[in-house]
Image: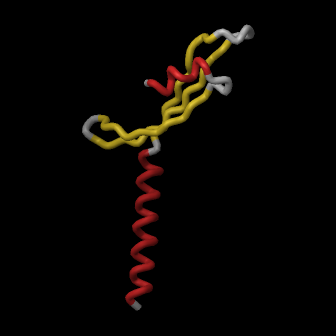
Amino acid sequence: MPFIDSLRDRREGAAQQSFDCTVEDKPVHLAVNVSALRDGRDRHLGHLLVLEDLTQLVRAQKVAAWREGAQRLAHEIK
């Protein structure tokens, strides 16, 4: 991933990105947090990669948005 490669030159040594993919024919929304690992002499040792499945959170946000839209529409109809 290009954003991981860019960590070598950045001082803060962290990046975040989210993306959608398919796992076992089901849509999944993932957040990726990457941190560059350095030793005491500031030499690059590698990366720590943390994946977080946000599928349920994204689904809940979409349901809440649709619910709010439906409530506003119902209010306008009244």
Residue extending furthest toward the right? 40
The residue shown at (46%, 64%) is: 64
Which of these two is toward me, 36 or 11?
A: 11
Using residue 20 as the reference point, say whether residue 42 is left or right of it. right
The location of residue 22, given as percent across then percent down, is: 31, 37
In the rendered image, the quadrant that contains the N terminus is top left
The residue shown at (54%, 35%) is: 16
Which of the 4 image quarters holds residue 75? bottom left
In the rendered image, the quadrant that contains the C terminus is bottom left
Which of these two is toward me, 75 or 11?
A: 11
Residue extending furthest toward the bottom? 78
The location of residue 32, given as percent across then percent down, is: 50, 33
Which of these two is toward me, 58 or 45?
A: 45
The residue shown at (59%, 25%) is: 35
Which of the 4 image quarters holds residue 70? bottom left
**Colouring used for the render:** secondary structure
Residue extending furthest toward the left? 25
The location of residue 44, given as percent across then percent down, is: 62, 11
Residue extending furthest toward the front? 9
Which of these two is toward me, 60 or 11?
A: 11
The number of numbered badges drawn on the structure is 0
The location of residue 31, given as percent across then percent down, is: 48, 38
The residue shown at (70%, 12%) is: 42
Q: Is residue 46 above or below residue 68?
A: above
Using residue 63 as the reference point, say whether residue 8 is left or right of it. right
